[in-house]
Image (tube, helix red, strand yellow):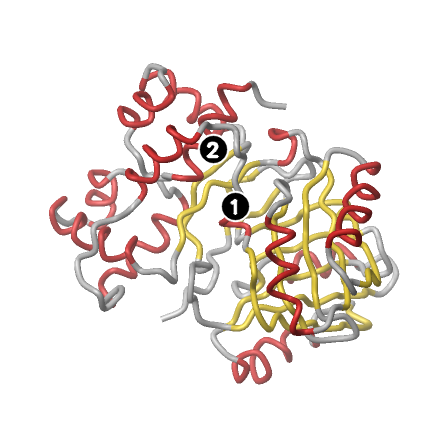
Amino acid sequence: MALAEDLELLHALQIAPRASWRSLGAVLHRSPAVLANRWQEMTDAGLAWCTAVPFGEGSPGVTAFIALLSEPGHQQTLIDQAVLIPEVISIEVPARRWDLILTVLVPDMEVFLRSLQPRIAGLDGLTRHETILCTRRHFGGHEWRLNVLDGAARTALQLQSGASAEDGKGIREEDRALIPLLFRNGRASVTDIAGELDTHASTVSRRLNRFLSDPRITLRCDVAPELVGQPISCQWFCWLPPNQHDAAAEVLRSLPDLRYCSSTTGQTNFTFVLWVKSPEDIFEIERKVVERIEHLTISESSVTVRFIKRMGWRLDDRGRRTGEPVLPMFMS
C-alpha cells in the first residue's frame, strides 16, 4: 500500500490532473521536484497514470456489460481477441459462471447491433454471451476520489482543475489529434505535444483548452488496486423500483469506495461496484446497503479475480498498467 504522501499526491491529481508541479507543491507543502520524481516512479512501475477518456458528463453513446462464456480451455483465446477491440474499454475475469465480463462503449444502438454485437458473437471459442445495457449512469470511475486531503487543499486544487474554454462548441476536427497523446499521458506538456504534432506551442494551448473544456471528455488519474490497499473489486446486481434509483445512488455515493453505479436492463435493473480490502467488507457493505436502501434486493454479487483491461489500458496480473494500450473509441 502507498505511503500517506503518495495518496495525497494521487488525490490531488484526481482533482487536478494537469496542475503544475509548482501548484501541487504549494498545496501539498512538498518540493515540486520530489513530487515530479515520485510521480514518474509510480507511472514507470504501472502503479498510477493520468489518461483522457470518453466518459465525461453528458458523453454520448451506449455503455453495456457483456458476459462471455468460452469453450473449455479457450478463455485466453477470448481475451486475446477482445482486448484488441477499441469499443471494449474494460475486461475483467469474474469469480462466477462467466469467463469474462466486457464493458463496452459505442456511439449508439445502431453501431452496437450492426457492428459490435456481430463481432462479439463471432469471437473464436465463444459458446454464449449475455448483454446488460446501462440505461442511466449515476456514478462513474472518473468521479472516484481517495478523500485524504482536507477541504482547503481540495478547494485550492479545484481552482487549478478547470480549463479556460476557447469556445462553447466543443472540440474541432483538428483537436482530435490530441486524443492519442493525452490518452497515453494526460499530463503531457504543451511543449511535448507541440513537438509530437510539429506545430507551435500557442496552437497547442488553444486546442488543449478547447479539448479539456469539452464535458464529454475526462482526464482521470487511475491507480493499481495494490497502491490503495483495495485488491478486491465487487459488483452487485440488484432490483429496485425505478422511481427509487436516484435516491439509492445518492446513498451509495456516501460510500467512499464506490467506483461505479448505473441503472440497467435485464433480470436486475441496478448495479454498483466497490473496491474493498477484504471479503469481510463485502458482507458489511451488503448489510449497510440493504439497511439504508428500502426495497433493494441483491440478486448477485460478483468478485473480480483479475482485471485484463481498464479504460483501454492493458493490465498485468497485479492490476498494473503494462504500457500496451488500445485507444478507446472517442465519440464525435
What residue is shown with label 1? Answer: 324
Q: Is residue 266 left or right of residue 71?
A: left
**Residue 316 falls left or right of residue 153:** right
The image quadrant that residue 21 belongs to is top left
Instruction: Say which of 102 and 252 sits in front.
Output: 252
**Does 29 appear above or below 189?**
above
Q: Nearer the viewer, residue 186 or 135?
A: 135
Q: Identify which amino acid the numbered label 1 is placed on.
A: Glu
Quadrant in which the C terminus is drawn: bottom left
Residue 317 in the image, given as x and y percentages of width and height: 69, 39
Residue 282, relative to residue 59: is it above or below?
above
Quick one: label 1, few (<14), some, or many (20+) residues within 10 Å?
A: few
For disc 2, the marked residue is 11
Please tell me which residue is depicted at 40% across the width and 53% down the height of the picture: 218
* Horizontal relation, residue 80 to residue 56: left or right: right
Query: Above or below — where is 266 with respect to 30?
Result: below
> Residue, x 11% and y 47% (percent of image)?
202
Which tag, 2 or 1, sits closer to the chain's start? 2
Give the amino acid type for the residue marked by disc 2 in the picture: His
Q: Residues within 10 Å of mark 2 (few under 14, many from 20)?
A: many
Front disc: 2 or 1: 2
Q: Foreground: 63 or 285?
A: 285
Q: Position of residue 208 (x, y in %)?
A: 24, 51
Number of numbered discs present?
Answer: 2
